[in-house]
Image (cartoon, rainbow, N blue to C red):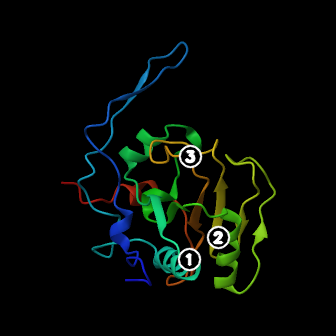
Amino acid sequence: MCGRFPRITKEFFRCHGSSLNPVRVKKREGKESLFFRDCSGNHSLPIVDGEEFIYPILLTLLNFLQEELGERLIITTGHRCPAHNSYCDYTSYNYGSKHMIGAEVDFYIDNMDPFKVVSCLEKFYGAPFSRYAKGNLNVRTEPWYNDEVFVKLYLPDEGRDEDNRHSHPYLSIQVRFDRAKKEPVRFDQKRSEHLLMS
């Protein structure tokens, strides 16, 4: 337990795919339609060194938030396998989602101002975040970042993919830097497909 609530582990990051979901169709003018089928949801997390893996900093941050704020944190998207990632959002923007490599999480805390949650993350790091003002993103609010993470706020009319069909504003945390390996975290297609499918 983490205070009043269950401690968040990598089990909370399981892919939400289901073979019961209907096929999604993307119609393209002058071209054949594309069909997207969801995964079964019955597979592993990303595999690193022979074990299921989620970046540890995500677990650390989520448990810190839950304990500091005293409210249950709801994870809406943890890991997505490539099939479920395409099913949720087949836009080119989503192609390189870090959800596929266990380096991104979407979440909200019910009835809590997301800016308060960001302030709590700054408390964890002991320093204010920088703001990303370059634009060309799928959110209106300038994201926050430091050397290790990148944080985006999705307002109620933004980011409503198949995993986030709710009315809450939510936050997304992406890992930018791997402390253990001392290297940047980048999406890799081959790595994203390294799953134990059953």
Q: Is residue 148 above or below residue 17?
A: below
Instruction: Give the residue at the far left of this rendering.
Output: 198
- Give the CA distance from mark 2 to mark 1: 7 Å
**Residue farthest toward the right in the current orientation of the protein:** 133
Instruction: Please name the amino acid that badge 1 sits on.
Output: Leu
In this orientation, which residue lies closer to the viewer: 86 or 122? 122
Q: Mark 3 highlights which residue?
A: 167
Mark 1 in CB contact with mark 3 (< 8 angstroms): no
Q: Are marks 2 and 1 in contact (CB under 8 Å)?
A: yes
Q: Position of residue 126 (x, y in %)?
A: 71, 87
Q: Is residue 126 above or below residue 49?
A: below
- Crowding at mark 2 (Cα within 10 Å: few <14, some 14-19, many 20+): some
| Element type at mark 1 | helix
Q: Quadrant of residue 175?
A: bottom right
Mark 3 or mark 2: name the one nearer the start of the chain: 2
Q: Position of residue 161 (x, y in %)?
A: 51, 42
Question: Mark 2 falls on what kind of element?
Answer: helix
As displayed, is residue 33 above or below residue 41? above
Q: Secondary structure at mark 3?
A: loop
The residue labelled by disc 2 is 117
Crowding at dot 3, Cα within 10 Å, few <14 / some 14-19 / many 20+, comes out as few
Place residue 1 in its image quadrant: bottom left
Q: Is residue 155 left or right of residue 100?
A: right
Q: Which mark is residue 65?
A: 1
Q: Amino acid at mark 2?
A: Val
Give the answer, above or below, for where 114 lies relative to 51.
above
- Looking at marks 1 and 3 on the same chain, the residue that comes earlier in the sequence is marked by 1
